[in-house]
Image (cartoon, rainbow, N blue to C red):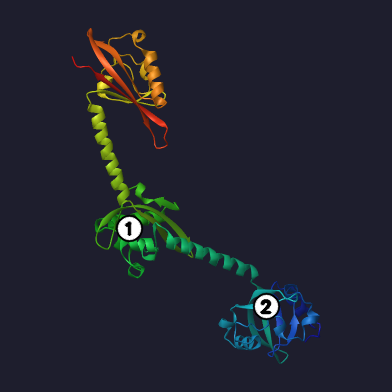
Amino acid sequence: MSDRTGVMDTPFHEAVLAGLPDAVIVSSPQGEIVLVNRATEALFGYPASALVGQSILTLLPPDPDRRADPVRWLARWAAEPDLQQSRFLDLVARRRDGHELHVGVRVRSGTVEGRELYFITVQDNTERRREQVAANAASLRAARILMVAEDAILSIDSEQKIIFVNPAAERMFGYSADEVLGQALTMLVPEAARSAHAGQVEAFGASRQASRMMSERSQVLGCRRTGEVFPLEATITKVQAAGSLTYTAHLRDVTERNRARDQLQETERRIRAVFDHATDALALLAPDGSVLEINQAGAALSKGGETLVGRPLWKIQWLGAPQAEVDTERLQAAIHAAAMGQAGKFDATLSRDGIPMPLAVHLTPISGSNGHISYVLVEGRLAKA
């Protein structure tokens, strides 16, 4: 059928084998190489003349980590049914220069001119193996990140069944992973909100958005194992892989944040009530002297008819005193000094209906968290008659 150079007598066979992109080795059942094509020469670095007549072990040496001898392995798989024979199995091959490479090997048996032969196809899996190792490493890193993440993370399938929860999600809801995997997501949602929540997820799946902050549209609530309902900040993403839709949600319990927000709002309401209804005139200034806030008592001392907020305090028209007669320079200097951290006070006189209104003015610098002056508080107290 061929000579020791590996060139077949039949030009047609030679042309077919030479043109195949994969390496093809023809061997006897005992592992003696009968023929190789050009792709085999290129892959392993041997000329055909150096391989024909040699053992297949030259290219597929025994692997210390595997018990099976390659020749026996070829005999076993060559005898498998066609469906099994079509599989490529991973082996480690060796090039002429001693370099090892991962290959996929498939073997089929056949008879040519009454002689049983093995037809061995070899594919270089080096790049695929490298990509697989990189993908496995990336998957491992991602898994570790998910496992140590502070946010609760859970994934559901297209039927809204839970397929993954991280430890933070277990702690948040009070269930172990074994208790929730395969269960409906609704077990973690308050009963009254289950129907609407399932509809939101379904609508998101049908949309073109890849991710969405669910709490932007309506409040998201979770339900712990104890039955406690709590507010959540939830971001949901979706991925279509292998024809299946998977959703992943990043969840954050905002109970404490909402409580702190409510407390801050209540404190602000109280301060606003005190500020607005104080009997003394109060104005909060920026360091440049422009009015940020002024209460009712302070606004009542102006002549009215003008916007007070945003104007320098010394340029406001005050009761009973033409602008030229008001100590604007003194007021401006006191504000600038307060903006530099120096508290100050002075007396001024306004009038209403010709009646003098003695006014004690106090300026207090207010520092921010960075230590710089953020505001100047101006207090005007009318002297008692």
- Specify whether 125 is left or right of 255: right
Quadrant placement of the N terminus = bottom right
Mark number for residue 198?
1
Say which of marks 2 and 1 sits in front. 2
Seen at 50% across and 63% down, the residue is 141
Q: Amino acid at mark 1?
A: Ala
81 is higher (above) or lower (below) than 265: below
Callout 2 amino acid: Ala
Q: Is residue 196 above or below residue 107?
A: above
User: Residue at 79% across / 77% down in the picture?
Assistant: 47
Q: Give the farthest residue toward the left.
A: 385
Residue 109 vs 156, above or below: the answer is: below
> Residue 150, image x and y in percent?
40, 57
Residue that sits furthest to the bottom in the current view: 114
Task: Give the CA distance from mark 2 to mark 1.
Answer: 53 Å
**Percent coordinates x, y for residue 180 in the rendering:** 33, 67
Count neighbours of disc 2 (C-alpha within 10 A) and say few if under 14, some if 14 to 19, many if 20 or more: many
Q: Quadrant of residue 267?
A: top left
Q: Residue 324 appears in which quarter of the rendering?
A: top left
CB-based contact (under 8 Å), mark 2 and mark 1? no
Label placed on residue 342: none
Residue 221 seen from this side:
yes
Q: Secondary structure at mark 2?
A: strand
Q: Which residue is mark 2?
A: 93
Q: Going by the image, does 36 lie left or right of 126?
A: right
